[in-house]
Image (cartoon, rainbow, N blue to C red):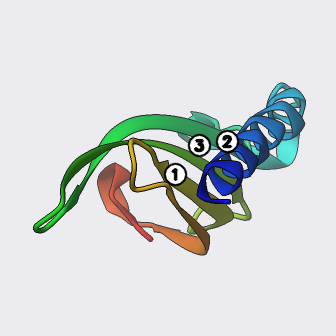
Amino acid sequence: MIKRRGQLASAAMLLMLLAVNPVQAQTSSEHETSEGFHAPHHLSLLPANTHVRGEGDFASLGVDYEYRVNQLLGLGVVVEHAFDGLDATTVLAVADVHLHGGLIMQ
């Protein structure tokens, strides 16, 4: 059962990548600012490591998608899955507040 959930989580991440990627290529003049063009869609893939105290380290893979609503606010989703025996998936709906100088508060 645990292995099946891990496979489902991996498949969900792959589907999310495939669904979002074609949209990323679209452009819109409404997202042009004085600093230049900012695409409204942002996709990140993060290979990482998850540490659980007392249990050790586990390889993780995360996917982050953000739709930039305006100069200040972005809305999105984060999906992260830890492998190697932990087999745990985290799914979060997020709001990104874009502060000065590229600093983002999620």
Residue for point 53% across, 68% down: 96
Residue for point 51% across, 51% down: 81
Q: Secondary structure at mark 2?
A: helix
The Cα atoms of the two marked residues, 1 and 3, are separated by 38 Å
Residue, disc 3: 34
Mark 2 touches mark 1? (CB < 8 Å): yes
Residue for point 67% across, 63% down: 76
Residue, disc 2: 10
Indicate which disc residue 55 carries.
Answer: none
Is 96 left, or right, of 3 in this rendering? left
In percent of width and height, residue 106 lies at: 44, 71
Binning the other alpha carbons within 10 Å of mark 1 as few (below 14), some (14 to 19) or many (20 upward) gives many
Q: Quadrant of the N terminus?
A: bottom right
- Is any part of residue 32 visible from this angle? no
Q: Earlier in the sequence, mark 2 or mark 1?
A: 2
Q: Is residue 27 above or below residue 91?
A: above
Q: Secondary structure at mark 1?
A: strand
- The one nearer the camera, 8 or 1, is 1
Mark 1 touches mark 3? (CB < 8 Å): no
Q: Determine the image quadrant of residue 70.
A: bottom right
Is 36 left, or right, of 22 in this rendering? left
Q: Amino acid at mark 3?
A: Ser
The Cα atoms of the two marked residues, 3 and 2, are separated by 39 Å
- The one nearer the camera, 61 or 87, is 87
Q: Is residue 18 above or below residue 85?
A: above
